[in-house]
Structures are given as structure tokens and as C-alpha cells.
Image (cartoon, rainbow, N blue to C red):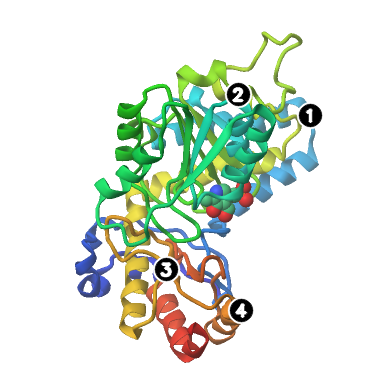
Amino acid sequence: MSIARRDFLKVVGGASVAGSLAGYGVNVGAASAAVPAFGFADDSVPMNAANLCPMPTLVSEAHAKYAKALDLSLSTASRQAIEAHKEDARSRIAAMLGTSADELAIVRNTSEANNVIVQGIPLEEGDEIVLWDQNHPSNSVAWEVQASRSGGTVRHFSIPNNAGSIDEVVDHFVAAISDKTRVVSFTHISNISGFRTPAAEICEAVRARKDDIHIHIDGAQTWGAVDVNIGAIECDSFSGSAHKWFMGPREVGLLYVRERHIDNIWPNVVSIPWGSTKDDAPEGARKFDALGQRDDAAVAALADAAGFHETMTPAGIEARSAIIANRLRAGLQDLGVNFVSSANPAFTSSIVILSVPRENSRQLVGQVFDDSGIQTAGTGGLRMSPHVYNTEDHVDRVVAAIKKNRALLS
Ligand SMILES: Cc1ncc(COP(=O)(O)O)c(C=O)c1O
């Protein structure tokens, strides 16, 4: 059974969840946009947006339509018509993220975007790279590999999960910086704890401490999940994957590079559409997405995914996702179970993680799926990352399944 549009409309209004959510400060009236249907079956419901999201049916149909059009005709006109969607997507995403289109590269995923920065920033002997210890390997191990090559050094630092205030978090960043720091790189929302960092405040404080540091933000758990304005955050680069919270095509990703840095960051791959000389680079950040032949149908479908976000609005999506995540948090709190994810509203996200002994994690994910038909993940504990396609019923089913299997939590 697929999720019908009327079911979304029923829950998107949010009135029935308002009472239990008021304590989280969520404006349940904010998410009033209509949500198109998704096609997943009711006995196989994704609640793992932090890993992979389904595309809305309209987007996957557009993807299939573009692929078919190419198979029916590889004429120049047909290819150019499909390829034109890439620039359309770039402009529309730039408008939503508060950047210019020239600052966005459409790459393959967050790993690639992170690695453009890791490998593209010219580092010198002794340069220090400061990393949050919850970074993904593509933004952590990748820096270590790069530092071994360039003679740089890597310093990891922690933020206590029970941090009490934004100032406290910011202080941990500033304390980790030295006069040698060249790069600070962190994950906006952690995939292993769900901790949402106060990115704008961090960037401001890092700049005040040393203004020539390159600040990179891994936005894999942010882009498409929250209403982020990159222009206002004042970071230097930002990465994301369309196949996560953006609910877009798989193997399509995003790299933002602030205009003033584009010339100084080396591209990892140089291919068409560069011209015939090294000075003939594509315009702006496009030089980072000159990856040779792409799956043009997938890239084109990015524009359709952007249309979905425009319809719901990024703020509407964030609010809707928060309503469901907060219902989930509330239901789990009622069970009295232990959380990995922070309960402090300043740092919560739609990634909710319960503490589970490592040896039970896989079994619990399997049991929860068998009992509820909800797909969770074993990352960082029992990880649930609901998004706009999840309903109150999905939340209630997953909570009931966890209650039934709670012996595996300890
Ligand atoms: C924070 C973070 N960064 C990067 C990645 C890598 O994403 P991708 O596999 O799409 O490159 C992930 C994947 O889960 C992630 O959570």
C-alpha cells in the first residue's frame, strides 16, 4: 500500500500532534503545504533519511522520463534539452540556499564534495587542520591522508553531548584553534549523534579568532532537512548529497565554494566542459563539477527535486520534519529509554538515536523492522531519522516495536 496524498495532508496540518509538541517549541501551524505522495510500501517504510531517502514519485518519474528520452534519442537537441536542467537546478538550489549559482558545483555526493576541499586547498608544511571528532570519514580520515602528503597536522576535538549552551559549544571550537590553524571543518548535524551545531555562531567566533581560516561545513545531514542560508552562515565551503534529506536523485551532490576562494582551490577532476587550455575553466564553481560524462537523467531530476522543495518551502519541510521527530522523541521519552542524541532543543535535529549495546544493534534494527515495517539504522545506536514522508502512524509503530524489544537496549 502506498502512502496517499490525503494521508500527508492529514498529518501535515499537525493539529492532532500540537499538544505533545508544544514543549519542543515547534510551530505546528507552520507546515501547511501540501506534500505529494511517495511510493514506498506501508510494510517497508523508510525512517533513515540520514542515510538515504526515497524520491517523491513525481521526481522518480521525471528521472525515468529523462533516462528514456535519452535512450530514444541521443541527438544533440535531445541531450542539450536534458542537460539544460542542470543549470536550472543550480539556480533554483542557489536561490534556496542564499548563494549565487556560480558558487555551486553539482558533484556526485558529499564524499566527493568534501574531498574537493580536502585535496584542493593548498596546504603548507606545519598547517594545522582542526576537526570535530564526529566528522564523517570523508571529512576526517580524508584530511589525515592529505596531511600525511602535505606535511600538515590534524587536531580532533570533542563537544560534550550534554553541552548546555551555544556559547559552550562555540568555546570548544575556539579553544581548538591555534595560530597555525589553516582549516576548521565540522559537520553541521552529526550522523552519529544527531547533534546540531550552531554553525553561524561557530563561523563568527572562528573568524574573530583568526580571519584567514578556511571553514568547511559538511551539510550531508542539513541540505534538504533544514532551512539553511549558507550565505548568512559565512562558511567558506559546504557539502551535501541530493539522495539524503533533499529526496533527490542518487549519486548527485552539492559543493558550495564562496566566490573569493574558487580560484584558489584546485579541482580534483579536470575534464569536459573545460576548454582546450588550463585557463579555459568553466565559470565559477562549475570547475569542480567537470567530471566527464554523467548520468544526465539523474542530474536533470535534481531540478524536479528542487521543485518539490520550492512547493513545500525549506522552512515548511524543516517544521514538518521536526513535528514528526519531536513526536518520536516524546514517545521514546515516555518509555524511559536512554538517548545518544541531545535533548537540548538548541542542539536537536530530526536524527534521534537511542543507546544500544553494539552487539545488539543489528538485531534490534531487524526486530524493529519485522515488528513495525519501519526501516531504522544501527549508526551510533538505534538511529531513526524521520522526514516529511513519515506520519504519526509510522512514529507510533516504531515506538511500539522498540517497547516490545526494549530488552535489546541494555
Ligand atoms: C555527515 C556525513 N558526511 C558525509 C557522508 C557521505 O555521504 P555520501 O555517501 O552521500 O557521500 C555522510 C553519509 O552518511 C554523512 O552522514
**Labelled pair 2, 1 in contact (Cβ < 8 Å):** no
Tell me residue 392's x, y (percent). 37, 75
Q: Is residue 99 left or right of residue 119?
A: left
Q: Secondary structure at mark 3?
A: loop
Question: Residue tagged by mark 3?
Answer: 340
Q: Secondary structure at mark 2?
A: loop
Question: How far apart in space, not on screen, are marks 2 and 4 (Cα)?
Answer: 42 Å
Q: Residue at x 55, y 80 (%)?
A: 373
Question: How far apart in space, not on screen, are marks 3 and 2 (Cα)?
Answer: 38 Å
Which one is earlier in the sequence, the residue at label 2 or at label 1? 1
Question: Residue tagged by mark 1?
Answer: 75
Question: Residue tagged by mark 2?
Answer: 125
Question: How far apart in space, not on screen, are marks 2 and 1 (Cα)?
Answer: 51 Å
Q: Secondary structure at mark 4?
A: helix
Q: Is residue 138 left or right of residue 184?
A: right
Tell me residue 89's x, y (percent). 53, 35
Which one is earlier in the sequence, the residue at label 1 or at label 4? 1
Q: Nearer the viewer, residue 68 or 87?
A: 87
Question: Residue tagged by mark 4?
Answer: 359
